[in-house]
């Protein structure tokens, strides 16, 4: 890219930025854009509490426009839709309201017309403007500006690189890069979750179940011939009714409707006596009078005549040609009860009946069934705070947003810190190699090559050699070059990264070529000479046998990074 094209691109970007700043400049500071954070439910379902409405001033407004104005009655900014207008002003109304506003704003009173909506943008804006966040943003900006300073001179570049290497150890820088990658992924997920959570409304339609219970209690009583069977001459609830001794038997049922916020309960209750044969035949023996329920409670009674029931049953058996069989005598409630619970209507049926087993000489009550209960579920649909399901746990939407924002902030800080600690010069092959393979590098203060030296083409090839021999890579940082060595018995593998631009990276130090083509490059002791005019990466140097291999002399500087084989 030429200087002219770079200048043109910079000018275009600057113009776009200036246009965006001019367009979005707040009206409070002389601009034409108004930002309103919505509250309440008057503009649902489009707007919810915490949304940010962006409005722009216009030359004229019409019916159907959503506008904002400062209400003199409410002493606040109101954003509603224009539904009518006249010379005295506009008539506005909330989309979720059934009434019109009392204010009549004129065009001069209107702050602007709705341009766009940012879901939950008002809450985010309030969080950014809070006193605790602004210092963090300022500190982060200062840190980024400080970290972005780049030395301009070659000496400054070398000094900055060495300061960076000395400030943090290579394992620390390598670990910081890994942390930066992981935390960056976490920050991306948190940002996605925050956007999703912010775009969701604060409320949702929920369903709640209310239980309305009708509790009953049966009782029966009657007179009987005093004696061994009935010492007091009274038949009480739970006693077997011996038909030869009993007279004036009466069965009663008391009911009561219970439930949270139950009101306006109305209904009637009566009791019928029904005889039922084993073959399925049944007939109503007697019917009691209806009783009006008062506030959901009441008692109904019916006379129980075993003789009449036995007569009906005998006639049935005679008609079908059967001498007899088992039968039951049931006191069956007939009722219909209505009412409201939390303002929702409900209807209750009748509770279960009381069934006696009819035998030849007695009526036997059931072991259970004297306290029947009828329940009715009433579904209540209402607007409730929104919640998210996370692993079967319900998390309120506000909590989810706070958690996502906190995770995003922490992950972003970790990403920035890891990137700053583990940063490297993208054009510095030595620095990239040091950070990438810090666990296998041992820094040394000085070194002496072995009798045979092989200069590899790149740093990764040298790392493969170290992995093959399962050994360390020795690193010597000189004023003009970084030297990396791997020693294997008589062979030394080497990779040199010069610092100066006049030296090609990845090549060992080479003196200036002489006038004769027969001149050779300087090589390590025991290496085969190579012509000085050879181009490209140096080939592998074939070692010359020597009687006794000279060991590599190494002086270790700093701590041992990694492990020894």
Image (spheres, grey):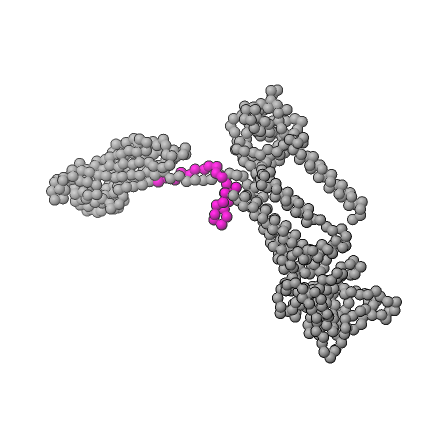
Q: Please give the range of residues in magenta.
A: 375-398
Q: Nearer the viewer, residue 310 or 269?
A: 269
Q: Nearer the viewer, residue 391 or 532?
A: 532
Q: Quadrant of the C terminus?
A: bottom right
Where is residue 545, by image quadrant?
bottom right
* Number of numbered discs visible in the structure rendering: 0
Q: Residue at x 67, y 47 (%)?
A: 144
Q: Relative to 514, is 315 on the left or the right?
A: left
Q: Residue 166: percent from the left, percent from the top?
A: 67, 57
Q: Nearer the viewer, residue 99 or 249?
A: 99
User: With respect to residue 178, does 110 lie above or below?
Assistant: above
Among all residues in the image, which is located at the extreme left? 227
Q: Residue at x 60, y 29 (%)?
A: 67
Q: Residue at x 35, y 40 (%)?
A: 375
Q: Residue 489: percent from the left, percent from the top?
A: 69, 74
Where is residue 561, by image quadrant?
bottom right
User: With respect to residue 253, does 175 lie above or below?
Assistant: below
Q: Residue 18: percent from the left, percent from the top?
A: 71, 37
């Amino acid at each position: 890219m030429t200087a002219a094209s770079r200048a043109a691109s910079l000018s275009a970007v600057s113009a776009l930025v200036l246009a965006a700043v001019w367009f979005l400049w707040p009206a409070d500071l002389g601009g034409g854009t108004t930002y309103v954070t919505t509250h309440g439910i008057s503009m649902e379902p489009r707007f919810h509490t915490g949304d940010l409405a962006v409005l722009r001033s216009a030359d004229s407004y019409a019916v159907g426009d959503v506008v904002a104005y400062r209400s003199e009655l409410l002493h606040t900014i109101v954003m509603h839709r224009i539904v009518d207008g006249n010379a005295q002003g506009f008539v506005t109304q909330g989309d979720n309201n059934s009434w019109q506003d009392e204010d009549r704003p004129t065009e001069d009173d209107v702050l602007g017309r709705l341009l766009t909506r940012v879901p939950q943008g008002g809450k985010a804006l309030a969080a950014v403007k809070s006193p605790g966040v602004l210092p963090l943003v300022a500190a982060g900006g200062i840190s980024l500006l400080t970290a972005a300073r780049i030395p301009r001179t070659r000496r400054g570049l070398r000094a900055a690189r060495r300061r960076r290497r000395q400030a943090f150890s290579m394992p620390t820088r390598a670990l910081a890069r890994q942390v930066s990658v992981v935390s960056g992924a976490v920050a991306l997920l948190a940002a996605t979750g925050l956007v999703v959570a912010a775009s969701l409304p604060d409320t949702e339609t929920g369903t709640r179940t209310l239980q309305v219970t009708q509790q009953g209690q049966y009782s029966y009583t009657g007179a009987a011939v005093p004696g061994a069977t009935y010492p007091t001459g009274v038949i009480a609830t739970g006693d077997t009714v011996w038909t030869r001794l009993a007279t004036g038997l009466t069965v009663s049922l008391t009911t009561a409707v219970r439930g949270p916020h139950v009101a306006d309960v109305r209904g009637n209750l009566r009791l019928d006596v029904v005889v039922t044969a084993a073959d399925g035949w049944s007939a109503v023996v007697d019917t009691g009078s209806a009783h009006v329920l008062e506030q959901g409670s009441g008692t109904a009674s019916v006379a129980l005549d075993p003789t009449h029931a036995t007569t009906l049953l005998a006639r049935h058996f005679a008609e079908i040609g059967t001498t007899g069989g088992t039968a039951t005598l049931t006191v069956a409630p007939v009722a219909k009860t209505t009412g409201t619970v939390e303002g929702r209507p409900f209807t209750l049926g009748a509770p279960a009946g009381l069934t006696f087993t009819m035998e030849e000489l007695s009526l036997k009550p059931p072991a259970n069934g004297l306290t029947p209960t009828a329940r009715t579920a009433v579904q209540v649909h209402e607007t409730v705070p929104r919640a998210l399901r996370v692993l079967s746990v319900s998390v309120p939407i506000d909590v989810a947003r706070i958690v996502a924002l906190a995770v995003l902030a922490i992950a972003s800080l970790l990403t920035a810190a890891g990137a700053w600690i583990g940063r490297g010069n993208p054009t510095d092959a030595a620095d990239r190699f040091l950070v990438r393979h810090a666990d296998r590098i041992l820094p040394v203060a000085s070194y002496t090559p072995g009798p045979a030296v092989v200069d590899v083409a790149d740093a990764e090839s040298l790392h493969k050699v170290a992995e093959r021999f399962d050994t360390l890579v020795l690193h010597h940082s000189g004023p003009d070059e970084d030297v990396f060595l791997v020693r294997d018995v008589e062979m030394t593998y080497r990779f040199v990264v010069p610092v100066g631009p006049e030296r090609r990276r990845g090549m060992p130090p080479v003196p200036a070529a002489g006038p004769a083509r027969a001149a050779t490059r300087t090589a390590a002791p025991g290496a085969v000479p190579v012509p000085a005019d050879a181009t490209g990466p140096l080939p592998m140097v074939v070692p010359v046998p020597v009687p006794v291999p000279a060991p590599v002399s190494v002086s270790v500087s700093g701590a041992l990074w990694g492990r020894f084989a």
